[in-house]
């Protein structure tokens, strides 16, 4: 597969992380949870009030060595940049947009969809959002395990933990959103499906 140009990668990183950050903002406002490393960061945010961006950035730090060893320096640098952008944009997005009314079901489905599309953009430009994404992409590229399905299993574990923190209806809505997110990845991010052109 022919690689992308540098400016194409840069545009995808910025737009992809902006889209993911909007989805996270919807989840933060509606007190929902998602999966992967972002889900763990949201759990900590909801439980403690700590800033999501700082928690998200910190949780990803241990995974960069695996990323470098297994996925290479280019993927690692792009992922580090993407995590940094989401950490920053997740703090800035609530300053750029606010909601007088936000139905939790809408937030769950649209927020999950936004995060899925944003992640898909990052994946197609050889970047992720750290943590579970690094492991999921490694397993798909080296062992043929679909990234979306692997993440769905991880997400289910996070949802079980959320049962001890959030109301049951919020966990159900969060599960629906996580399903939308992972279906977008599973149906669209397949080896050989996407080819870039110079």
Image (cartoon, helix red, strand yellow):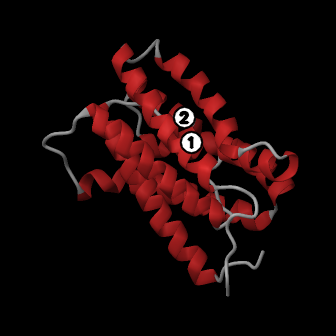
Q: In the rendering, at what x and y percent does residue 36 appear?
A: 59, 37
Determine which of the numbered discs, if any, sits on residue 36 in the image: none
What is the residue that sits farthest to the bottom in this orientation?
198
Query: Few, some or many C-alpha atoms within 10 Å of disc 1 (few <14, some 14-19, many ≥20)?
Result: many
In the rendered image of this protein, does residue 132 appear above or below residue 82?
A: above
Q: Which image quadrant for residue 167?
A: top left
Query: Few, some or many C-alpha atoms within 10 Å of disc 2 (few <14, some 14-19, many ≥20)?
Result: many
Residue at left 52%, top 22%? 159
Residue 148 vs residue 56, the one in the foreground = 148
Q: Secondary structure at mark 1?
A: helix
Closer to the chain start, of discs 1 and 2, is 2
Foreground disc of the pair 1, 2: 1
Q: In the rendering, at what x and y percent does residue 31 appear?
A: 33, 30
Structural distance between the alpha carbons of marks 1 and 2: 9 Å
Q: Looking at the rendering, in which quadrant would you find the C terminus?
A: bottom right
Q: Is residue 82 left or right of residue 137?
A: left
Q: In the rendering, at what x and y percent does residue 179 appear?
A: 51, 35
Q: In the rendering, at what x and y percent does residue 111 appear?
A: 38, 44
Q: Looking at the rendering, in which quadrant would you find the N terminus?
A: bottom right
Determine which of the numbered discs, if any, sits on residue 35 in the image: 2
Tell me if label 1 and label 2 are in contact, CB under 8 Å: yes
Residue at left 67%, top 83%? 197
Q: Secondary structure at mark 2?
A: loop
In the rendered image of this protein, does residue 97 appear above or below residue 133?
A: below
Determine which of the numbered discs, if any, sits on residue 182 in the image: 1
Residue at left 78%, top 48%? 140
Residue at left 45%, top 67%? 15
Q: Is residue 97 left or right of residue 100?
A: right
């Amino acid at each position: 597969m022919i690689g992308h140009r540098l400016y194409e990668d840069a545009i995808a990183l910025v737009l992809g992380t902006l889209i993911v950050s909007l989805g996270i903002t919807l989840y933060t406002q509606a007190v929902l949870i998602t999966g992967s490393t972002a889900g763990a960061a949201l759990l900590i945010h909801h439980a403690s009030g700590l800033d999501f961006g700082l928690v998200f950035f910190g949780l990803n730090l241990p995974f960069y060595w695996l990323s470098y060893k297994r996925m290479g320096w280019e993927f690692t640098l792009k992922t580090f940049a993407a995590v940094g952008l989401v950490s920053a944009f997740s703090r800035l997005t609530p300053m750029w947009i606010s909601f007088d009314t936000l139905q939790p079901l809408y937030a769950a489905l649209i927020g999950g969809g936004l995060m899925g599309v944003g992640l898909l953009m990052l994946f197609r430009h050889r970047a992720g959002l750290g943590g579970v994404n690094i492991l999921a992409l490694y397993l798909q590229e080296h062992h043929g395990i679909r990234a979306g399905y692997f993440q769905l299993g991880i997400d289910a574990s996070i949802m079980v933990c959320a049962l001890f923190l959030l109301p049951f209806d919020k966990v159900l809505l969060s599960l629906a959103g996580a399903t939308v997110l992972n279906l977008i990845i599973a149906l669209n991010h397949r080896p050989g499906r996407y080819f870039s052109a110079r």
